[in-house]
């Protein structure tokens, strides 16, 4: 065996000037000093320095294969990890193949990139051409090497998309998204989306209730209202109450009482009769039919009128609005105490009602003059930065923990109804902070705008 190895060594020396390396497999070697080289760069430097043209491959069961070169009576060894040549080793490592076996399989298939090879291996493509077509058109959704079942494979999505006529994954994903949300066609989905709806069942419910867009519908949902008519009536009543509150610098409960006193007919009213009149007025104004009509109802058996036994989203919503005061105190508009005789007396004694009538304390008579003053609040000053931020339109879902500044944010759950509100309203709903994805997008946009300003050429004055 020593003679054989010496013969190989002579060949190595004879062929030293050859540029191309030759690889020879051996099973044993001479017992000479061995230096192990860790870096392929260092190993190739040794080969080039000594003009070596033959590399011996020694396959060992315990430690794996190694590349050997010998010069001046010393072995230089480099671990090959199963690769057949140094160029294959470098190519396999540079392409991030997990093993030499994977590299060889990919090489035989004509695949140079490891990500494409593992993509092909983990799927069930009919041929390599389909694999490349799928990969290049975005049908890449996972990085794992295995699936729980075939339906999870990207190849399954690819062939299903082809059947439907979709060549790109983005188009197929869009199809999956709108069909999962109940839309039958893309045009139907785009029309709904233009109105702010992302779910067909939500669109159907909203449309049947008279809403033309999701902003209105979500506002109604937030207030607990079921129809557009109820929302319109809610905004009319609450808008008038807020005008009174702003003009007179009152809080909402007394402003609400003043608003309902304006609905009373002209004439003299005993204080004891006022609660019933106000309660009936409240019940009438907060009862809206599907056509937006206001049926007047009265419950003669109720001490305070029909409102005390009535149930409904509109009445609850207005009650909640009136009760939500600056000082945190809450009134229950549906309780008898709000329209009680004692509350009415207290109101007349402490608040000016001269624009709509007069109150005689001794006779306990309220004389309604029939006038209905219109309150036009002072124009609001320009909003400061914080107010502008609170008025910014944001998006959120019922079960989400954050609000979003971008309607197309990838973190929004499209299976839930989308709420469109101000920042303040989003925070009131428990969505305390902005989504991290949206925050990064906003920061990037600001930075880009600043960079554009900074890089703009100076203007000569």
Image (spheres, helix red, strand yellow):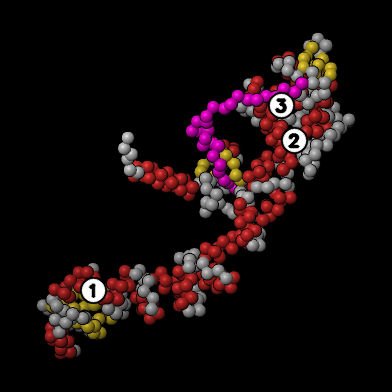
Pointer 2 residue:
315
Residue 145 visible to an observer of this rendering: no
Q: CA distance from mark 1 to mark 2?
A: 84 Å
Where residue 52 appears, x then y in whole percent? Answer: 16, 79
Mark 2 residue element: helix
Relative horizontal placement of residue 102, taking residue 366 as reference (left or right): left
Q: Do labels 1 and 2 touch, CB within 8 Å? A: no
Which residue sits at x=51%, y=37%? 389
Name the dominant secondary structure of the magenta segment: loop
Which residue sits at x=84%, y=17%? 268
Q: CA distance from mark 1 to mark 3?
A: 89 Å
Pointer 3 residue:
256
Residue 386 falls within the magenta-colored stretch: yes
Q: CA distance from mark 3 to mark 2?
A: 13 Å
Which residue sits at x=62%, y=57%? 189
Find residue 78 and name its label.
Answer: 1
Task: Using the rendered view, name the quadrant where residue 175 is placed.
Answer: bottom right
Dot 1 or dot 2: first in sequence order is 1
Q: How many other residues sit within 10 Å of disc 3, few (<14), some (14-19) or many (≥20)?
A: many
């Amino acid at each position: 065996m020593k003679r054989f190895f010496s013969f190989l060594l002579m060949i190595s020396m004879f062929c030293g000037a050859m540029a191309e390396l030759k690889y020879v497999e051996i099973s044993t070697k001479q017992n000479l000093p061995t230096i192990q080289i860790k870096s392929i760069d260092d190993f190739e430097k040794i080969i080039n320095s000594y003009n070596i043209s033959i590399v011996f491959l020694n396959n060992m069961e315990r430690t794996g294969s190694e590349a050997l070169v010998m010069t001046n009576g010393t072995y230089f060894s480099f671990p090959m990890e199963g690769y057949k040549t140094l160029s294959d080793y470098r190519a396999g490592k540079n392409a991030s193949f997990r093993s030499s076996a994977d590299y060889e399989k990919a090489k035989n298939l004509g695949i140079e990139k490891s990500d494409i090879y593992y993509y092909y291996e983990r799927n069930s493509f009919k041929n390599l051409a389909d694999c490349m077509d799928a990969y290049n058109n975005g049908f890449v959704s996972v990085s794992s090497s295995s699936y729980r079942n075939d339906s999870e494979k990207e190849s399954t999505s690819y062939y299903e998309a082809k059947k439907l006529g979709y060549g790109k994954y983005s188009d197929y994903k869009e199809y999956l998204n709108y069909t999962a949300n109940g839309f039958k066609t893309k045009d139907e989905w785009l029309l709904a989306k233009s109105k702010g709806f992302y779910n067909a069942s939500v669109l159907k419910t909203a449309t049947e209730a008279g809403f033309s867009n999701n902003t209105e519908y979500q506002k109604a949902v937030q207030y607990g209202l079921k129809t557009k008519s109820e929302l319109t009536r809610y905004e009319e009543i609450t808008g008038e109450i807020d005008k009174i509150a702003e003009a007179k610098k009152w809080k909402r409960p007394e402003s609400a009482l003043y608003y309902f006193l304006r609905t009373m007919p002209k004439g003299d009213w005993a204080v004891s009769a006022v609660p019933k009149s106000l309660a009936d007025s409240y019940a009438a104004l907060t009862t809206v039919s599907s056509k937006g009509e206001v049926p007047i109802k009265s419950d003669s058996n109720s001490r305070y009128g029909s409102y005390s036994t009535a149930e409904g989203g509109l009445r609850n919503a207005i009650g909640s609005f009136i009760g939500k005061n600056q000082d945190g105190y809450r009134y229950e508009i549906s309780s008898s105490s709000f329209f009680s005789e004692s509350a009415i007396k207290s109101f007349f004694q402490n608040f000016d009602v001269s624009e709509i009538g007069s109150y005689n304390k001794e006779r306990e008579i309220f004389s309604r003059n029939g006038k209905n003053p219109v309150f036009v609040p002072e124009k609001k000053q320009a909003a400061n930065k914080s107010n502008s931020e609170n008025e910014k339109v944001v998006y959120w879902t019922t079960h989400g923990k954050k609000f979003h500044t971008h309607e197309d944010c990838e973190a929004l759950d499209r299976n839930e109804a989308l709420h469109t509100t101000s920042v303040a309203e989003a925070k009131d709903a428990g969505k305390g902070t902005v989504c991290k994805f949206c925050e990064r997008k906003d920061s990037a946009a600001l930075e880009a705008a600043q960079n554009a300003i900074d890089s703009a050429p100076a203007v000569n004055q």
